Image (cartoon, rainbow, N blue to C red):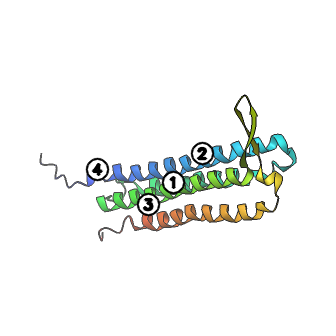
Amino acid sequence: MASGFSGDETAPFFGFLGAAAALVFSCMGAAYGTAKSGVGVASMGVMRPELVMKSIVPVVMAGVLGIYGLIIAVIISTGINPKAKSYYLFDGYAHLSSGLACGLAGLSAGMAIGIVGDAGVESFFTLCLGLCNLMWFVCCRANAQQPKLFVGMILILIFAEALALYGLIVGIILSSRAGQSRAE
């Protein structure tokens, strides 16, 4: 065992884990936001098909979250080349924290976009019909009923998207710290 193991041989594992975390968590947020908002848009389209394109904004905004994770994953993966330049544990941890910052921010933003997007295009109310004690649940879309809610919904979606943008910015800053661990 005279190989001189310094622990740095495991550093790329943490870097690649950061790249995977950025992409996976951001795409999970994008998928949740797309699915949750898409269900609301599809249901609203049954009542008012002319408003479908106007109500698809949350789906598009949720899809952008996956792009943020892709950007960080590419930045991280291009920074991992132990044969060209020494890659230390500090670098691996910097890339891991970069990926987690972007990925988890994207996941939380996707959840917020999905919930707001769904609630923005739909509002639920219960209609009791008293027929053999059966409850009929009737969905009415808020955007179809009250167009003034659209601007407020867009503003809330923008602030939810900003959460993922903060994660992207912090991820870029953290990944730029990799390579600064030791003076070479």
> Tag 2: Cα neighbours inside 10 Å, few (<14), some, or many (≥20)?
many
Secondary element at image label 3: helix
Dot 3 or dot 1, earlier in sequence: 1
Q: Position of residue 68 (x, y in %)?
A: 57, 57
Secondary element at image label 4: helix
Q: Residue at x 69, y 42 (%)?
A: 39
Q: Alpha carbon of mark 4 to alpha carbon of mark 2: how far?
A: 32 Å
Q: Which mark is residue 10?
A: 4
Identify residue type, mark 1.
Answer: Val
94 versus 26 height, above or below: below
Q: Alpha carbon of mark 4 to alpha carbon of mark 3: how far?
A: 17 Å
Q: Alpha carbon of mark 2 to alpha carbon of mark 3: how far?
A: 21 Å
Closest to the observer: 183 or 61? 61
Q: Is residue 175 left or right of residue 122?
A: left
Dot 4 or dot 3, earlier in sequence: 4
**What residue did someone put label 1 on?**
74
Q: Position of residue 37 (x, y in %)?
A: 68, 48
Q: Position of residue 89 (x, y in %)?
A: 29, 58
Q: Is residue 183 left or right of residue 54?
A: left
Secondary element at image label 1: helix
Q: Mark 1 and 2 residues: CB-CB less than 8 Å, in contact?
A: no
**What residue did someone put label 2 on?**
31
Q: Is residue 36 left or right of residue 169?
A: right
**What residue did someone put label 3 on?**
98
